[in-house]
Amino acid sequence: MNEIATAASPTPRAWSGFAATAALQGLVGAWGTWNEDSFADILRIGRYIEGSWQPEPGGRDVRPPAAGSWTELIGRTGALALRAAAPATRPERREVLLDFLQMWARTPFADPAYRFRLGRLAEPTSFTVRDHQGASFSLHLPAAGKTLYFEAVLPGGEAAPCPEEPLYVVDCHRGWGDPGQLLRLVELVRERGPVPWDAEVALALSEATGLSRPAASLVLAGNPGAGSYYQPFLDEHERATFGFKAGELQAAQDELSMLRNDDRLALLADVMPTDPGDLWAPGGLGRVAERIAATWAQQHGTRPRPPWNTWQAAVALETRMPATHLCHLFLDPANATLPAGFYLRASPCPPEHRHLRTAWDVMGSYDAETVADALFAGLTWAYADLPAGDPVRSGAPEVVHHVRKVLSGRDSPARILFSGVTSGSRGSRRWDWLTDGTCDRVMARITADDLPAGRYESDPCACAPDLVTDVAAALGLSEDPAALYLQLLVLPAPSDRNVRRWNAWTPARHKSAAAELVKRGLVVVDRRARAGRTIFLPGPWAHGKKPLPPMEAWKAPLIGAQLSADGSTVRDFELFPGTLPDLFTKAWRLVRGGEGPSA
């Protein structure tokens, strides 16, 4: 019998179902089934298993509360302990977690001398039985259409009584979290407060796993992509602890949405130190990160990590595929990360097999469209908006090679992906771009290494310096305004911020170049929604709904953008119909031939 459980101990504090679910979200589910008696009910079930409590005749039934979801925590409370000790946990949720761990320590569920098993029953039945060897429970969940099975074997026992033969049972993991460890952790957090945060440790975890920095921070804080039962996902205090923007943390949540509750528990079950006090010792959090990295590699493999600026730019693309997964398409095409939700179409998919599937193993049209949309948006972005030498940009030709290889297959995923690439209004344009030589010419610009490291293809001075010289001479301009004029003629989003990044210009240098164009009457000054600039080519303007860029209507046919029938709105833009040096040259040829933009 659990000595801690039989010691004098108060009834756990009552927490509302809202508070309990919010504190446990992403680790334990069963939204809407927790109530203020749930913690006490778990403690009572533990006493029933031990034999120290029996319900009175006609009294309350012995039934697992919270839809039995808490049984997933057996042997895996390390995840809750890490979250309870992390500084990026709301104080009110920390108190719920500490109370839960304190309650759990007084139950046989924390006692390694007991054996527990979980499973399913075929019949929609509910029962509770106990004998001298143990106890078993069945809980039918009509809304979920399943019947849970849970059994406990007492120390020295061989088998628990079982009125019904289960479809399957699995032994519960036995890891960190015996009664002494749990109570010690609770004591330390209440005495010392949460563990000090170390952003460098989170960065090291990111480098070791391929997770983005915000995602690695969430994992290290025991909050690995928790669900969104309650908003906001992170409050102001939590975001301030991490030091990331709200959009970056939302992208990290999307990145980690590939994990289910069970995956998150398994990831963090055994990362806590044997002595909880080591968390507060020098290097303690770093040692936790090392254990997390090792477990992550075992469960999910590791991926190359994109540069921080590249990841931030991928977030801004707003593809359905999370930014980190999009980068993985380019950094490691053959083993590209399985996006969120894909494996759920083949549920249940055993954990040991999930890592074998990649982004190319699509199982439905939505998955195929997600991959295709991210792929083609990423190719344009990598080519034109990332600097030479960036590993994501350098990986673009290999992505093209791999997707062609996948599409040439005859298996089901290949056919589904082909449909995702070629369906819809973009389908024929995508296929032509892949097969008519345009793609090859664009990729050749990347493999040629003509650009100096750190320079951009969107900078005419870098990719077409002779053309800039010709434009400057013909228009009587200096080099900077000539380059800026070419950018306005061709690029879909030549915002002030983008131009300064592509050209490595200071605001003063940019302002000077723009002023010369205004003085020569080549551009007009205006303010337009979502443009991010104040100078424009003369002529009609096409608005664009995010994420499509608004642009001058004149350049749309030149760069492959699709406009509405009246030309007032950008309906689509995805792929350049040629290399940027060719498009800069073509645009200048039109201007020289009297076909340039005009009011």
Image: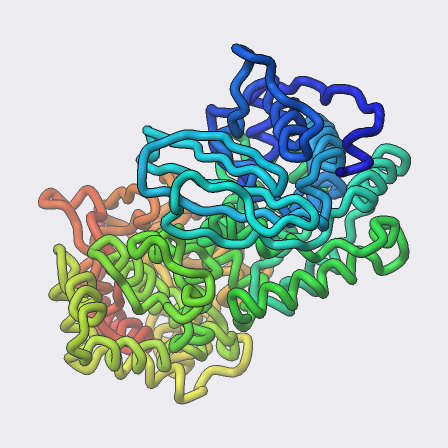
Establish if 582 lies above or below 177.
Answer: below
Q: In the image, 364: left or right of 193?
A: left
Residue 396 appears in which quarter of the rendering?
bottom left
Q: Where is residue 498 in the image (x, y as percent from the top left)?
A: 47, 58
Q: In the image, 409: left or right of 112?
A: left
Residue 28 visible to the viewer = yes
Establish if 173 lies above or below 91.
Answer: below
For this rendering, which residue is in front, 139 or 56?
56
Q: In the image, 488: left or right of 265?
A: left
Looking at the image, which residue sits at the far bottom? 448
Q: Look at 37% across and 68% down and name the residue there.
A: 357
Looking at the image, which residue sits at the far left? 565
Q: Look at 22% across and 53% down and name the residue there.
A: 572
Residue 485 appears in which quarter of the rendering?
bottom left
What kind of colouring is applied to the model shown?
Answer: rainbow
For this rendering, which residue is in front, 378 or 498?
378
Establish if 188 lies above or below 14.
Answer: below
Q: Look at 15% across and 80% down and name the residue there.
A: 436
Looking at the rendered image, the quarter that the N terminus falls into is top right
Q: Position of residue 135 (x, y in %)?
A: 56, 37
Residue 482 visible to the viewer = no
Q: Look at 86% across and 36% down and name the residue there.
A: 187
Looking at the image, which residue sits at the far front? 132
Q: Where is residue 465 in the image (x, y as percent from the top left)?
A: 42, 80
Residue 270 appears in which quarter of the rendering?
bottom right
Establish if 325 lies above or below 189.
Answer: below
